[in-house]
């Protein structure tokens, strides 16, 4: 029996711009043209004021470590435990789940509020994931 | 909703709890339902309202032979049954039905006839959480806790004490799955599951079920059991994605549902004799104590570690042993409700003396939903 594969995102019409962005090396967020609210995950209207006039923009890719677990078991298919599942607070405001790379997966190395920057990981020709790593400098 | 207008007149769990390899999930529903019907001295044909979660109402109604005029299939995770109680009380008050049966059952351990749960790859969870290695509740539910600990100065030892105190309650309960005493050191030395949580800070995985029967308070006095009245109720939802909670320092769904129930009940926190806070993992009682307004968040860990919620303490909490030690089939809310009803009837294995008001607070998903029911045995 084939080993179960890592869960892979399947874009929808409303999220395609995000996945096109990661493929192009950009972390894309949306901003409401009416109330300036920046939000995630993607949708073609503002979840704060309901305006349909929203714009996609390239985010800084910078953020900080908001919280995490270090998962030991059970491990998701395609992952080798222990691995951290993190929530990153982006400088623009929204938070997103991610993995922290180029960093030991230990409580000592993973310090809350540490500065992070996006690090893209190409899974295949369609999907590139936004991981994060400790910010340089 | 009017206070004390509706009462629980039947309540029962499945005949067995724990590992039940000889029953499918649908039969566990029936076992719990038949026990509750017997408890209330009713016949199945007396039931004209029905609610359940995960399984569809039509599935369970057909299996039991019930012909309802009101159904509720609200399915928002483990607190669905708190929402069913709230909706049933409103339906009875509105005259849509007279006698409501609410069932829960789950073959969580033996997995016989259990519906598959999967996350579609094109859902928001499938796109923005699943690819990062979340795999079941232990990898997701504890994600907020490190932030909560940092914000409020909660310690690993305090979070370990939640499991220790609940094991003390479980030791008094013959039906609890885990009864042997444990120490904070035992908890902190148990197998790591998802840092910072270890095995003894994660809920059990068991088989079982439970059922409740509600009717109007006017009719309730004619039933064999002491009626347990619905004094206040609340509900809310936030997000199915734990990463998208407004904050990890509290639960928005808890903060809506809990205070709504207190306001409806017209009670103060000092009036609460008995408290259940759904404990899928050890941090939930801390969130619950804070979000329901019992105390500042900074005090919640110390409050439990100091023994205030243990047998003989001033705020008895999770007196059946909770999801950590009593049982947890996957959707524990029904068992919290059953314990509140037992306490209000005065028949709990670890009975709180003279308890008159019980608050039962549930969570669904990973802080995704919430329901709060406040019971009383005095009208």
Image (spheres, coloured by chain):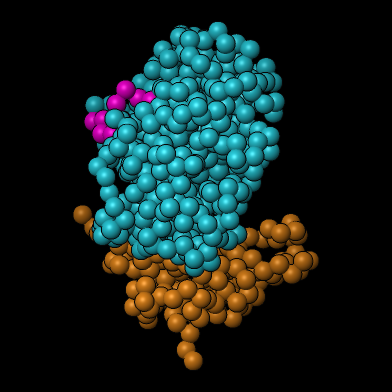
Which one is nearer the viewer's eye here, B86 or B152? B152
Question: Does B235 lie within the magenta span?
Answer: no
Dividing the picture into quadrants, the one containing residue B142 is bottom left
Magenta segment: B13-21
- Position above or below: B279 against A46: above
Q: Position of residue B355 (x, y in %)?
A: 51, 29
What is the letter of the orange chain?
Answer: A
Q: Residue furthest right?
A: A34
What residue is rendered at 61% in x and 48% in y?
B293
Dividing the picture into quadrants, the one containing residue B222 is top right
Q: Position of residue B233 (x, y in %)?
A: 62, 34
What residue is rendered at 21% in x and 54% in y?
A1
Q: Position of residue B349 (x, y in %)?
A: 36, 28
What residue is rendered at 34% in x and 78% in y?
A104
Question: Does B16 lie within the magenta span?
Answer: yes
Q: Is residue A71 left or right of residue B224?
A: left
- Position above or below: B68 against B127: above
Which one is nearer the viewer's eye here, B375 or B184? B184
Which one is nearer the viewer's eye here, B341 or A119? B341
What is the letter of the cyan chain?
Answer: B
């Amino acid at each position: 029996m084939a080993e179960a594969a890592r869960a892979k995102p399947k874009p929808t019409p409303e999220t395609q711009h995000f996945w096109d962005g990661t493929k192009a090396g950009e972390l894309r967020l949306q901003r409401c043209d009416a109330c300036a609210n920046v939000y995630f995950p993607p949708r073609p209207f503002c979840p704060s004021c309901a305006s349909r006039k929203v714009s996609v923009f390239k985010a800084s890719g910078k953020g900080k470590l908001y919280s995490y677990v270090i998962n030991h078991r059970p491990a998701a298919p395609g992952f080798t435990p222990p691995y951290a599942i993190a929530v990153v607070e982006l400088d623009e405001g929204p938070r997103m789940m991610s993995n922290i790379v180029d960093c030991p997966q230990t409580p000592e190395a993973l310090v809350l509020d540490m500065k992070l920057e996006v690090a893209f990981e190409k899974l295949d020709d369609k999907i590139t994931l936004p991981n994060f790593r400790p910010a340089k400098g | 909703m009017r206070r004390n207008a509706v009462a629980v007149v039947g309540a029962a769990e499945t005949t067995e709890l724990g590992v039940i390899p000889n029953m499918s999930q649908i039969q566990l529903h029936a076992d719990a339902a038949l026990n509750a019907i017997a408890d209330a001295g009713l016949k199945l044909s007396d039931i004209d309202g029905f609610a359940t979660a995960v399984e569809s109402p039509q599935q369970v109604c057909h299996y039991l032979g019930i012909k309802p005029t009101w159904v509720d299939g609200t399915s928002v995770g483990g607190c669905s049954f708190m929402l069913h109680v709230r909706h049933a009380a409103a339906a009875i008050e509105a005259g849509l039905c007279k006698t409501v049966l609410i069932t829960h059952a789950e073959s969580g351990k033996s997995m016989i006839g259990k519906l598959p749960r999967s996350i579609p790859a094109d859902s928001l969870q499938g796109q923005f959480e699943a690819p990062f290695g979340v795999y079941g509740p232990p990898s997701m539910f504890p994600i907020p806790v490190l932030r909560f600990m940092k914000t409020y100065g909660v310690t690993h030892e305090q979070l370990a004490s939640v499991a220790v105190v609940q094991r003390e309650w479980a030791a008094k309960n013959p039906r609890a799955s885990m009864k042997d005493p444990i120490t904070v050191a035992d908890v902190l030395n148990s197998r790591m599951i998802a840092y910072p949580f270890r095995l003894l800070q994660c809920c059990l995985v068991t088989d079982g079920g439970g059922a409740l029967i509600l009717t109007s308070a006017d009719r309730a006095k004619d039933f064999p059991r002491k009626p347990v009245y619905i004094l206040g109720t609340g509900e809310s939802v936030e997000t199915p994605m734990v990463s998208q909670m407004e904050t990890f320092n509290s639960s928005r769904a808890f903060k809506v549902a809990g205070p709504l129930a207190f306001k409806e009940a017209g009670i103060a926190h000092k009036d609460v004799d008995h408290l259940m806070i759904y404990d899928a993992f050890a941090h939930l009682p801390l969130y619950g104590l804070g979000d329901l307004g019992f105390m500042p968040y900074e005090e919640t860990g110390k409050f439990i570690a100091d023994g205030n919620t243990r047998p003989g303490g001033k705020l008895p909490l999770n007196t059946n042993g909770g999801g950590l030690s009593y049982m947890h089939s996957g959707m524990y809310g029904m068992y919290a409700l059953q314990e509140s009803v037992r306490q209000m009837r005065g028949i709990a294995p670890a009975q709180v003396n003279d308890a008159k008001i019980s608050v039962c607070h549930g969570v669904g998903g990973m802080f995704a939903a919430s329901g709060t029911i406040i019971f009383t045995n005095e009208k």
